[in-house]
Image (cartoon, rainbow, N blue to C red):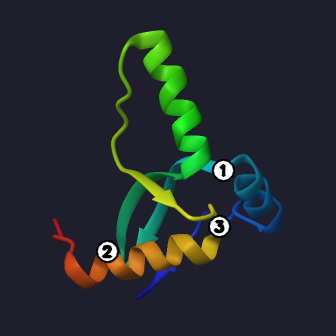
C-alpha cells in the first residue's frame, strides 16, 4: 500500500491535529487514488456535531472517520483496513 500525505503534513501539524482532535478534508493519495476524509477523535466529533445540531438542527458531513487519536499511524491503519475490504475502482 502506498499512501502519500501532503508535503505540509509534518510532525508539528500532526501534533496540532492530535491535540485539536480533528483534521478536516485531508486529501491523500492512496495507491494512485485520491481520497478526501475528515478525521475526528470521538470527543471532538461529539462537540462539533452538537454545535451543528444546535445551530442548524442537523449534522451532516461526508467521509467522516472517527479515530481513537487523530494521528498518522491511525490514519494509516484506517486505510489499511479500508483497502482490505474495498478495492477502489480506477476511473
Q: Is residue 52 above or below residue 30?
A: above
In screen coordinates, is 36 left or right of 70? Answer: left
Q: Give residue 61's position: percent from left, percent from top.
A: 37, 36
**Quarter of the rendering occupied by the C terminus:** bottom left
Image quadrant where residue 18 sits = bottom right
Q: Which residue is mark 3?
A: 71
Name the residue nearer the viewer: 18 or 11: 18
Crowd rating for badge 3 (residues with CA inside 10 Å; few <14, some 14–19, many 20+): many
Q: Which residue is mark 2?
A: 82
Crowd rating for badge 2 (residues with CA inside 10 Å; few <14, some 14–19, many 20+): few
In screen coordinates, is 77 left or right of 20? Answer: left
Q: Which residue is mark 1?
A: 21
Q: Earlier in the sequence, mark 2 or mark 3?
A: 3
| C-alpha gap between disc 2 and disc 1 | 21 Å
**Residue drawn at the location 79% of the way across and 61% of the way down:** 15
Q: Earlier in the sequence, mark 3 or mark 1?
A: 1
**Which element type, helix, strand or loop, lies under badge 1?**
loop
| C-alpha gap between disc 2 and disc 3 | 17 Å
Q: Is residue 4 visible?
A: no
Q: Is residue 50 visible?
A: yes
**Which element type, helix, strand or loop, lies under badge 3?**
loop
Crowd rating for badge 1 (residues with CA inside 10 Å; few <14, some 14–19, many 20+): many
Label of residue 77 in the image: none
* Residue lying farthest to the bottom in this orientation: 1
**Residue drawn at the location 71% of the way across and 59% of the way down:** 8
Q: Give residue 14's position: percent from left, percent from top.
A: 73, 62
Q: Dots 2 and 1: beta carbons under 8 Å?
A: no
Q: Earlier in the sequence, mark 2 or mark 1?
A: 1
**Residue drawn at the location 58% of the way across and 33% of the way down:** 47
Q: Give residue 79's position: percent from left, percent from top.
A: 40, 74
Amino acid at each position: 500500500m502506498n499512501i502519500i500525505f501532503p508535503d505540509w503534513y509534518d510532525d508539528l501539524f500532526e501534533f496540532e491535529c492530535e491535540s485539536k482532535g480533528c483534521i478536516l478534508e485531508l486529501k491523500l493519495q492512496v495507491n494512485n487514488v485520491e481520497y478526501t476524509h475528515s478525521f475526528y477523535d470521538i470527543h471532538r466529533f461529539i462537540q462539533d456535531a452538537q454545535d451543528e445540531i444546535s445551530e442548524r438542527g442537523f449534522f451532516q458531513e461526508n467521509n467522516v472517520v472517527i479515530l481513537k487519536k487523530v494521528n498518522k499511524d491511525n490514519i494509516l491503519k484506517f486505510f489499511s483496513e479500508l483497502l482490505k475490504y474495498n478495492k477502489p475502482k480506477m476511473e
